[in-house]
Every structure is written in structure tokens, then in C-alpha cells.
Image (cartoon, rainbow, N blue to C red):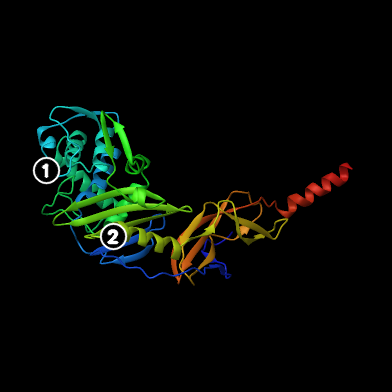
């Protein structure tokens, strides 16, 4: 009977040592951050935890909540409160009816403050109830230093966020196909309206996939964006930045050049061997149950250790999970992938009996 224990094999695999061009980077923003969307690794930050006004980048959260809780084909009736909301607008009229999808295009392309209120009232019955749901969703995403007072981003007491929190929101938005489909649309005609996206990065920069611009006099220019290149997704946030278009392009050039993805594990790829007791083979190959990548800078190395849950004894079946590959950077764990037996290993006794039987029958 085997005693159950965590047995980490002694060998360490040096997976990779990258040699890439390292670039200096800076922005004109009061607060900024660049994050790898899939790993969550911070590639650049500047006052990233400073609580600031965020203007219409708020509407990313508005759209996320609306898509999660609403139905795109549902019809909403525009209230007087929505139609007369101040600021940027998709020019809604009192009493007109539009689908939620049309309102979302008005929200994300035209940055309609009127659309935000119409969406909130349709989805939750009131603006106040919708804002409460926004704050609940923000907390579930991990936005620990944010507070929302309205669905459109107009300056208000208790309405603020940080660059780091907005990057987390962008990562969550990037996982929502409907939101990204709308946010990446440059121009659309829907519901009798033709709308053009305010996000100039979509045309300025190859690989930009959204997200949202913002401006108020107090907040200044705010911008949250996403970009993808060679399978790597990055998000950038700048708050109070008069040069945001150029700064986002600079951030992405820096991130993609200096932190390319290294694929440490590929689904089904062998990652090592472990001993097998009483088998026709002494070892079994372990294969990755999933893929794993991590952005690495020049000179950085990932290390991998195989953690085996218990010693293996034949019979061993292909596909059985027997441990994990643990990936670390500078001694800090950054990810894990389950390891499966890549082949079956019968016990020696069965193999011998089978050979004896075949010999007798011959």
C-alpha cells in the first residue's frame, strides 16, 4: 500500500532563455498600465493604483453587465430621463423602441450617455438597481479599488477606479465575444441609425480589438484598449492622458516586442517520464493535459518541476492523471498543467502469462 505524498522529482527543466530587444517606455498619462490579458502579468505600470475619474470607459462595465443579464433581441422603450441625459449621445427620443443590441452599439461606438441610462433601466428596472449590479460585478472581477455611481461615467461622487482595476475589467471584457464584436466594429447601420466608433486605435493600429474611449473636463482623456498579435492578447489603460492614441501604440510595441509569449506546454506534448513499479516498462511518459504560455522578457527563464501525487504501479492506463507540471519564474509559481499518462503499462505478470499462453498454443 502506497503512502500518499507529494513527490517532486529532482530534475528541473530549463525551458527557455529568450533574447529579445528590450525597450524603454513611458507615457504622458497620470496613471497607466499594460497587462498580458491571459496571464495577468503586468508589463508596465505607472501610478496604477491611483484612484481617478474614468469617464466613459465606465461603459465597458455597463456593456458587460447588460450582455450578461439581458437579451440582445429584447426591445427597450426610451424614457424621458434617458433621452435627456447630458453629454455624448446617440440621440435617443422619448418613447422610441430599440433592441438592446442597438443600444449597445450606441453605448460602445457613439459613447451614448443616453444609451447607458436606457440600457440600465431596461435590464434592471432602474438606474439605481443596475448600478448596484455594476458594483457587484466589479467586485467579482477583482476590482477592489473601484466604485460606480452611474452607468455612463459622468463625474460623480463615489465614481472612480484605477488603471489596474480597469485593466482587470478589460481582461474580463475580452472574454465576452458579444462585447468584443460590438466594440471592435468601426461603423454599423442598425435600428435605422448609422454609427461610427470613436476609438481611432481601430484604424491607427493593426491588431487593435477595442475597447472604449472616455472624456470629461475633470477626468481628461481616458482610454482602455485591447490588442492581439501572434496569439498574444494585451490590454492597455491610460487615465488623464492628452496623448493617449500615441501612448497606447507605444505601449503595445513595447509589450509585444519585449514580452513575447513562450509556450511552456502544449496539449498532448510529452513533458517527462516517471517510474512505474512492476510494469513491463520501467517508466511511463507524461503528457500535458492542457497548453500553457507565459510572457517572458529578455534573460528570463521558466523552470518546470513535475509533482507526482503518488508512486505508480502497474497496471497504468493511458489518460490517467498522475500529477502536475509546475511552472515558475524567479522562484515564484506562475502556472500549473495537469499531467496524464501518455500510454498504458500492463503489469509484468500479465505480460508473462500472455507470452506463456501464446507459446503453448503454438
Q: Alpha-carbon neighbours of circle 1 within 10 Å: few (<14), some, or many (≥20)? A: few
Circle 1: element type: loop
Kindly indicate the quadrant of the structure image that contains residue 332. Answer: bottom left
Q: Alpha-carbon neighbours of circle 2 within 10 Å: few (<14), some, or many (≥20)? A: many
Location of the C terminus by quadrant is top right
Vertical side of 26 occupied by 162: above or below: above
- The percent coordinates of residue 145 (x first, y second) are 22, 59
**Could you tell me if residue 89 is visible in this image?**
yes
Tell whether 182 sits left or right of 62. Answer: right
Q: Observer-nearest residue: 164 or 349? A: 164
Tell whether 294 sits left or right of 161. Answer: right
- The percent coordinates of residue 66 (x first, y second) are 26, 39
Location of the N terminus by quadrant is bottom right
Vertical side of 212 occupied by 275: above or below: below
Tell whether 209 sits left or right of 52. Answer: right
What's the mark number on residue 64?
Answer: none
Q: Earlier in the sequence, mark 1 or mark 2?
A: 1
What's the mark number on residue 164?
Answer: 2
Circle 2: element type: helix
Q: Residue at x 18, y 49 (%)?
A: 153
Amino acid at each position: 500500500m502506497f503512502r500518499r505524498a507529494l513527490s517532486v522529482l529532482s530534475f528541473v527543466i530549463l525551458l527557455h532563455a529568450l533574447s529579445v530587444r528590450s525597450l524603454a517606455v513611458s507615457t504622458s498619462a497620470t496613471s497607466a498600465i499594460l497587462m498580458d490579458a491571459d496571464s495577468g502579468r503586468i508589463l508596465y505600470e505607472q501610478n496604477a493604483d491611483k484612484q481617478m475619474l474614468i469617464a466613459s470607459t465606465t461603459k465597458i462595465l455597463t456593456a458587460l453587465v447588460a450582455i450578461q443579464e439581458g437579451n440582445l433581441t429584447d426591445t427597450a422603450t426610451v424614457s424621458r430621463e434617458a433621452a435627456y441625459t447630458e453629454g455624448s449621445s446617440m440621440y435617443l427620443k422619448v418613447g422610441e423602441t430599440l433592441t438592446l443590441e442597438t443600444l449597445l452599439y450606441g453605448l460602445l461606438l457613439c459613447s451614448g450617455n443616453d444609451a447607458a441610462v436606457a440600457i440600465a433601466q431596461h435590464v434592471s428596472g432602474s438606474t439605481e438597481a443596475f448600478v448596484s449590479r455594476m458594483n457587484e460585478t466589479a467586485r467579482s472581477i477583482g476590482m477592489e479599488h473601484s466604485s460606480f455611481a452611474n452607468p455612463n461615467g459622468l463625474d460623480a461622487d463615489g465614481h472612480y477606479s484605477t488603471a489596474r482595476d480597469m485593466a482587470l475589467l478589460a481582461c474580463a471584457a475580452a472574454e465576452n465575444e458579444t462585447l468584443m464584436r460590438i466594440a471592435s466594429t468601426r461603423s454599423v447601420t442598425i435600428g435605422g441609425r448609422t454609427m461610427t466608433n470613436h476609438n481611432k486605435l481601430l484604424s491607427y493600429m493593426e491588431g487593435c480589438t477595442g475597447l472604449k474611449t472616455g472624456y470629461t473636463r475633470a477626468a481628461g482623456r481616458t482610454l482602455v484598449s485591447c490588442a492581439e498579435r501572434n496569439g498574444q492578447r494585451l490590454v492597455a489603460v491610460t487615465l488623464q492622458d492628452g496623448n493617449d492614441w500615441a501612448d497606447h501604440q507605444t505601449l503595445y510595441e513595447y509589450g509585444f516586442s519585449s514580452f513575447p509569449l513562450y509556450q511552456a506546454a502544449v496539449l498532448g506534448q510529452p513533458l517527462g517520464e516517471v517510474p512505474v513499479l512492476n510494469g513491463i516498462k520501467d517508466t511511463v511518459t507524461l503528457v500535458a493535459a492542457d497548453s500553457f504560455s507565459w510572457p517572458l522578457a529578455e534573460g528570463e527563464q521558466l523552470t518546470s518541476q513535475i509533482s507526482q501525487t503518488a508512486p505508480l504501479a502497474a497496471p497504468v492506463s493511458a489518460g490517467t492523471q498522475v500529477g502536475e507540471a509546475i511552472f515558475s519564474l524567479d522562484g515564484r509559481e506562475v502556472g500549473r498543467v495537469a499531467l496524464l499518462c501518455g500510454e498504458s503499462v500492463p503489469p509484468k505478470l500479465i505480460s508473462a502469462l500472455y507470452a506463456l499462453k501464446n507459446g503453448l498454443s503454438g
